[in-house]
Amino acid sequence: MTIEDNIQLLLSKREEAKLGGGAKRIEAQHKKGKFTARERIELLLDEGSFEEFDMFVSHNSHDFGLEKQQYLTDGVITGYGTIDGRVVYVFSQDFTIFGGSLSETMARKICKVMDQALKVGAPIIGINDSGGARIQEGVKSLAGYAEIFQRNIMASGVIPQLSAVFGPCAGGAVYSPALTDFILMSRDSSYMFVTGPKVAKTVTGEDITTEELGGADVHGKKSGVSHFIADSEEEGILILRKLISFLPQNNLEDPPFVSTNDTIHRMEDLLNEIIPQNSNQPYNVKDVIFSIVDNGEFLEVQRHYAMNIVTGFARFNGMPVGIVANQPAYLAGVLDINASRKAARFVRFCDAFNIPIVTLVDVPGFLPGSNQEFGGIIIHGAKLLFAYGEATVPKITVTLRKSYGGAHDVMGSKQLRGDINYAWPSAEIAVMGASGATEILEGKNIGKLKTEAEKAAYTKEKEEEYSRKFSNPYEAARYGFIDDVIEPRNTRFRIIRALQTLATKKDSNPPKKHSNIPL
Ligand code: HXC
C-alpha cells in the first residue's frame, strides 16, 4: 500500500465511523426530532474543538449473529473538547447503532474518558440515548454498567458530572445519570425509569404510558430526579453550556470569575418596598434574586420541583455563587420533605466545588401534618441542616422576613457556621409566629374571658406584644446571631463586600473517613 492508500484507508474508515448505524437510521433519528450523537457533541462543544477517541472500536460479541453486524464506534462517541475555551470530556450514545445499547466495549470507551477526565481534573458530560444493556451481550453488559457506576462514584465531588437524557434511559442504566451531579431531560423525547410501563402493567396492573411514567415533566416536577427540563435538545445543550460556566474544573479550583459591567454599587429601591405590609402576604423571592445578582442572570436548578425553595447559580461582581431562597409565593415558603432534599443536595454540590452559598430566608417553619411526619421529614429536614453545617465554603445569609423555629436554625444560621448573617428590617426571627405563640402562652387566660370581644381584644394585645418583642431582627441582632440589619436596597453591595472578604476563608471539618449524613 502506498502512503496515499494508507491515508485513503484512514479517511474512509473515518467516514464509515461518522455514518454510525447508516443513513436510514440517521434519518429515523431526525424524524423523531432528535439529533444524532455526533450532532449533539458538535452543538455542545466550541466549534472545531472536539477530539475523538476510539473511533475504530467495534464490539467483541459472537452471539445471536452479532459478529456479522459490526459498526465502528460501537454506539458511543467519546472524547474531549472545550466549552468557552475550558476542557470538558464527553460521551454521547448513538441510538443508530444497536439502539445505543451498552456493550462491553461501549462501557470500556465510556470508562476511558471518565478515567481521563478524573486524571486531568475536567468535567464530564454524558449524553444518554440508549436502549439499555445490549441484550445479546448479557452479563458482560451489566458488568460494563457497574464499571461506569464505580467511576461515577469515584468522580463524585472531584469533577463536575453532568448528564443529558435525550432519549430512552431505562433499567439499571438510569443509575449512571442518577449518580452524577445534574440531570437534564428533553421534553417529549426522553424518559427514565427503572422498570417500564409493560412491567408495571404485569406487576401492578397499572396502565401508564412511557411519558407518564418517566418523561421530562415527571422527573422535573414530581420525582425531582431531573434538574432541568428543556423544550428541545438545542435548549438543553445551551443549558449545559451555561451550567458549566458557573462550575470549576474540579474540586481543587475556584469557580470561574467572569468580569461584569454591573456595578457593585447598584441600589435597588424596589427592594425597600418588596415585603408586603401584611406578613402573611406572599411576594416572589425570585424578584429579589433577579435584582441583586449580576445583570439579573440566574440559572435556576430544579425550577419546577419543590417550588417552595428556589435553588440556582448566579454571579455577584463576577463571582459564581449558589443561591438558596425560600419562596413565599409557593406554599408560603414552608420547608417540607422535597424542599429539604432539593436544597440539601444543592448546598452539598456547592460546597464540594468551592461555590459560596448565599441564602435568602423567608420561612414560616416546617410543614406540619401526618403526611410529612410519616414521610420522614425528621430525616429529610436533617439533610438540609447537615448540609449547611458541614459546608465550609463562604456562607452568607440574608433574612428577608420570617425565620421561625427549627427552620431558622436550618437555613444557614450563624450557629451552623454562617459567616455573615444579615437581616432586613422586616425580618421576624423567633421561635414561632405571634398568633401561634399567643395561643400557646395565653390560651388559658383567653379561655377565662367571657365575651368574644374581650377575647379578641386580649388576643390582639398579646399578639402585638409578642410581635414587638420577637417578630423583628433586633432580638437576634442583640445576641450577635445577626451581624447587621441592612437596608434592602443595599443588599447587592453588602453581599458583594461579604463575598470579597470571605474569598480567602479557610474552614475545615475534623478528619474522618466520611460523614454519615442522614440519607
Ligand atoms: C440490543 C437494541 C436494544 C438493546 C434497542 N436495540 N435496544 N439492541 N440491545 N437493549 C436495537 C433494536 O433491535 C433496533 O435494531 C434498534 O436498536 C432500534 O430499536 P427500535 O426498537 O427499533 O427503536 P424504538 O422503536 O425507538 O424503541 C426503542 C426502545 C426499544 C424503546 C429502547 O428498542 C426497546 O424497548 N429496547 C429494549 C430495551 C430493554 O429492555 N433494554 C434492556 C433493559 S435492562 P435495528 O437493527 O432494527 O435498528 C437494562 C439493564 C441495565 O438495561 C442494568 C444496569 C445495571
Image: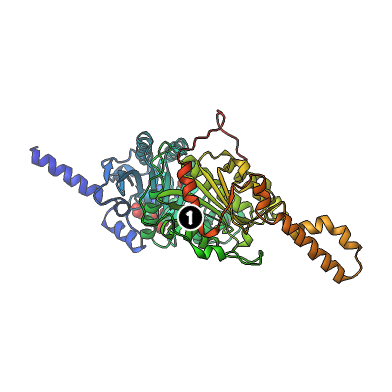
Which residue is nearer to you in this view: 193 or 21? 193
Q: Position of residue 145 (x, y in %)?
A: 44, 40
Residue pictured at 51% horizontal, 47% vertical: 357
Question: Which image quarter is the N terminus in?
Answer: top left
Q: Is residue 303 visible?
A: no
In the displayed structure image, the side of residue 238 where residue 146 appears, left or right: right
Location of mark 1 (residue): 492
Whether 4 is drawn above or below 437: the answer is above
In the displayed structure image, the side of residue 460 where residue 227 appears, left or right: left
Whether 108 is drawn above or below 445: the answer is above
Which residue is nearer to you in this view: 356 or 206? 356
Q: Position of residue 356 (x, y in %)?
A: 48, 45
Q: Quadrant of residue 327?
A: bottom right
Residue pictured at 48% horizontal, 62% vertical: 268
Q: Position of residue 394 (x, y in %)?
A: 51, 42
Residue pictured at 41% horizontal, 46% vertical: 247
How crowded pointer 1 is (Cα within 10 Å; few <14, some 14-19, many 20+) is rated as many
Q: Position of residue 346 (x, y in %)?
A: 52, 48
Amino acid at pointer 1: Arg
Q: Is residue 92 visible?
A: yes
Callout 1: SS: helix
Q: How is the image coloured?
A: rainbow
The image shows a total of numbered marks equal to: 1
In the displayed structure image, the side of residue 470 where residue 115 appears, left or right: left
In the displayed structure image, the side of residue 315 where residue 89 appears, left or right: left
